[in-house]
Amino acid sequence: MKAEQTPLSWDTPGLLAGVDEAGRGPLMGPVVAAAVILDELNPIKGLADSKKLTPQRREALYDEIRAKALCCSIALATAEEIDRLNILQATMLAMRRAVESLRLKPNKVLVDGNRLPTLAIVSEAVIGGDAIVPAISAASILAKVYRDRWCAEFHLEYPQYGFASHKGYSTAEHLAALREHGACPQHRRSFAPVAEVLR
């Protein structure tokens, strides 16, 4: 009996873009989204969910993705936009900006998770997509590395918060710094731990 592979729902002809984000959970800074169209003739080994890679491996893959992908785009929604829209809508905005900034127009967009931004292109949400769809894995790496670099740069301006180490997440160190120094311009005022110190 001949075995047949069931085609996946995202197996469509034409250019495929993967989209993912980084930075929904932190108390500060932008949420970053990336969109990537990989080149099937120039494969990249070792793509995986960015959270499962070491920082050094992410950095190396970031450069390789930028060099080998057919095209890629990184976009963000600012802390101010997050406060104005809410984190979900700001994430969708960043994703839409990333897709719309691609140099090539994809035939289909696959987005990690269970929500989709409003796009004028056929799109599909893929739960756990950063682990099973290479283009989404690549997007997750670009978004994560870009945001981590952003945090490291912003740390130089506000070293008292420790952004370079915790990347804005709600760690004990970060919360203690918030209580001691108050909020900086990049803190998300709509997030409860930040709102508490502003009362």
Image: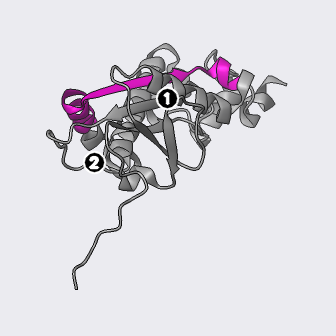
Q: Position of residue 67 (x, y in %)?
A: 19, 27
For the residue labelled by badge 1, is the local secondary structure a helix, a strand or a loop?
strand
Tell me if mark 2 has few (under 14), some (14-19) or many (20+) residues whose alpha carbon lies within 10 angstroms of its own: many
In three-dimensional space, the C-alpha distance between marks 2 and 1, rounded to whole angstroms, equals 19 Å
Q: Amino acid at mark 1?
A: Val
Residue 18, quarter of the rendered image: top left
Question: Mark 2 vs mark 1: which is more N-terminal?
Answer: 1
Tag 2 and tag 1, C-beta contact below 8 Å = no
Q: Amino acid at mark 2?
A: Leu
Q: Nearer the viewer, residue 198 or 6?
A: 6
Q: Nearer the viewer, residue 60 or 10?
A: 10
Q: Position of residue 101 (x, y in %)?
A: 42, 19
Magenta segment range? 59-83
Furthest toward the left, the residue is: 41
Question: Does 185 appear above or below 96?
Answer: above
Residue that label 2 marks = 47
Q: What predominant SS class does the magenta segment belong to? A: helix
Residue that label 1 marks = 32
Q: Is residue 67 magenta?
A: yes
Q: Residue at x 61, y 40 (%)?
A: 170
Furthest toward the right, the residue is: 199
